Amino acid sequence: MNKEIVDWLLAEDNPGVRVRTLTGLCGFAKDHEEVRSACRVVTQTLPAAYDLSWVNLKGQVLTYNLTALAESGLSYTDVSIEPAVNKLLSQPFDAGCGDLMALRALVMLGYGNDPRVKERLAQLRDVQLPDGGWLCLHRVRKMKKTPKSCIRATMHGLLLAGELKKQRLSLNGSVPLVGYFLKRRLFYRTDNPAQLVLPDYPGQRMTDVFFPIEYFRVGLPVLLDALAVLGAGHASELDEAWQLLESKRDQQDRISLEGTLPSNRVYLPKERVGKPSKWGTLYACLAWENRKNT
């Protein structure tokens, strides 16, 4: 790993990236004093951590704030989020984008062994579709024949499976899930191998460095990190995706941001499109390291 890049990621201007770099790239345990110190800075500077007015809300706001804490390397021991977690886990489970994004956040926050989370993970396997992915249950129930999965929900299922693997937990059904993306070479249609599955605006596609993740969009470095963690880093079907990520490095090995959420929806400190992104670079480095180690 390029020491200059690691030093850049460890700078104190982005506390969340610093925490994730210490644990993800430097190999420090969560209880290491340097990590604990960095986490304290996050709790003092990240709005989702020091202003907990959102814990009594629901829906997207709840999911995004939990994800802000999770992405920044915090756990339930760092912030009092139990009311939000209880509310989230008492809501009906639909296996859609928001449900899976929220489950990943809970796993990252240390709830992977919570019986309520385990119950949802078991249910997720039960409703996994034959092609390896998922579709909102309220839509599945209306269909007379077996539907195809929604790639947006399935992307979040992939990230969830990757996070479980990082924590030495597992999601039954990971093999067909990975196969779903290999069949598409990550981001192409199966019925037209030259067309993107989600041909969105530039900066908002699966081929772009988009961050932070949202219900409908996940960027290339985050997707490749999950696939590498799940053991598919060297699959030939992903060669083009890895080459694409490699092409995004600048001369200093940094990755520039190509897309992000509107200012009124960004739940992490905003980075500028077109400029080197610490989050994009962090996830690219994690992806390369996890690929190398599998």
Image (cartoon, rainbow, N blue to C red):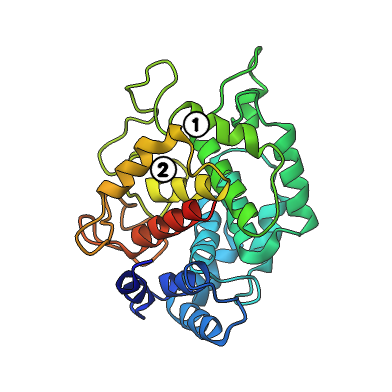
Residue 171 as seen in the image, left or right of residue 180: right
Q: What amino acid type is highlighted by mark number 1?
A: Leu
Reading the image, the residue beneath label 1 is 182
Quadrant of res 178: top right
The Cα–Cα distance between marks 2 and 1, rounded to whole angstroms, is: 19 Å
Quadrant of res 98: top right
The residue depicted at 47 percent of the width and 44 percent of the height is 215
The residue depicted at 28 percent of the width and 57 percent of the height is 255
Q: Which dot, 2 or 1, sits closer to the camera?
A: 1
Q: Secondary structure at mark 1?
A: helix
Quadrant of res 30: bottom right
Residue 243 visible in rendering? yes
Expressed as whole percent of the image width and height from the top left, the position of residue 117 reads 73, 53
Residue 125 as seen in the image, left or right of residue 252: right
Q: Nearer the viewer, residue 286 or 147?
A: 286
Res. 237 mark: none
Q: Nearer the viewer, residue 206 or 63?
A: 206
The residue depicted at 64 percent of the width and 19 percent of the height is 142
Q: Are marks 2 and 1 in contact (CB under 8 Å)?
A: no
Q: Secondary structure at mark 2?
A: loop
The residue depicted at 62 percent of the width and 81 percent of the height is 31
Residue 208 visible in rendering? no
Expressed as whole percent of the image width and height from the top left, the position of residue 281 reads 34, 60
Residues packed near mark 1 inside 10 Å, few (<14), some (14 to 19) or many (20 plus): some
Reading the image, the residue beneath label 2 is 217
